[in-house]
Image: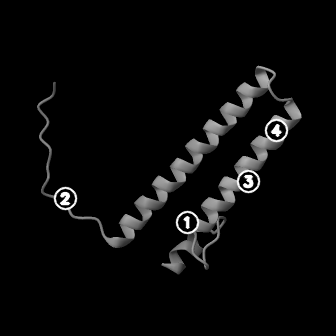
Amino acid sequence: MTNRKIDWGGYKPMSDAEKKCASQQQYAITALVLMTGLNILFGALVVYGVISVLVGMILSFSAMAIIIVKANRDLLDDDETMWESPEDFRNRQ
């Protein structure tokens, strides 16, 4: 054990913008975990011979595309893009 003291004096509540960012990050991580789980499932089905490699690849690609499109629609506003530069992001704020 260490004798470190936690300084709670600098704590401040999150602003609405910070809450929105935290919610978006949680949604994005959940989408990535779901995508990874589906890819593992489809890979296991291919390895055990339940489905063919071609069908597994098509299912995996389709699931990833659907998750990306859904996350894109849910997370990004009308004026945002997935590939914006840091300068565009700062100018938008």
**Residue 50 against residue 19 in the figure, above or below:** above
Ranked by sequence position, the earlier of labels 1 and 4 is: 4
Residue 19 position in % (x across, y down): 36, 65
Q: Which mark is residue 11?
A: 2
Q: Residue at x 60, y 60 (%)?
A: 71
Res. 82 image quadrant: bottom right
Q: Residue under label 1, please give it.
A: 75
Q: Residue under label 4, please give it.
A: 57
Q: CA distance from mark 1 to mark 3?
A: 15 Å
Q: How many marks?
A: 4
Question: Mark 2 touching mark 4, by CB under 8 A?
Answer: no
Q: Amino acid at mark 3?
A: Ala
Q: Residue at x 60, y 74 (%)?
A: 80
Question: Mark 1 touching mark 4, by CB under 8 A?
Answer: no
Q: Residue at x 75, y 41 (%)?
A: 60
Q: CA distance from mark 3 to mark 4?
A: 12 Å
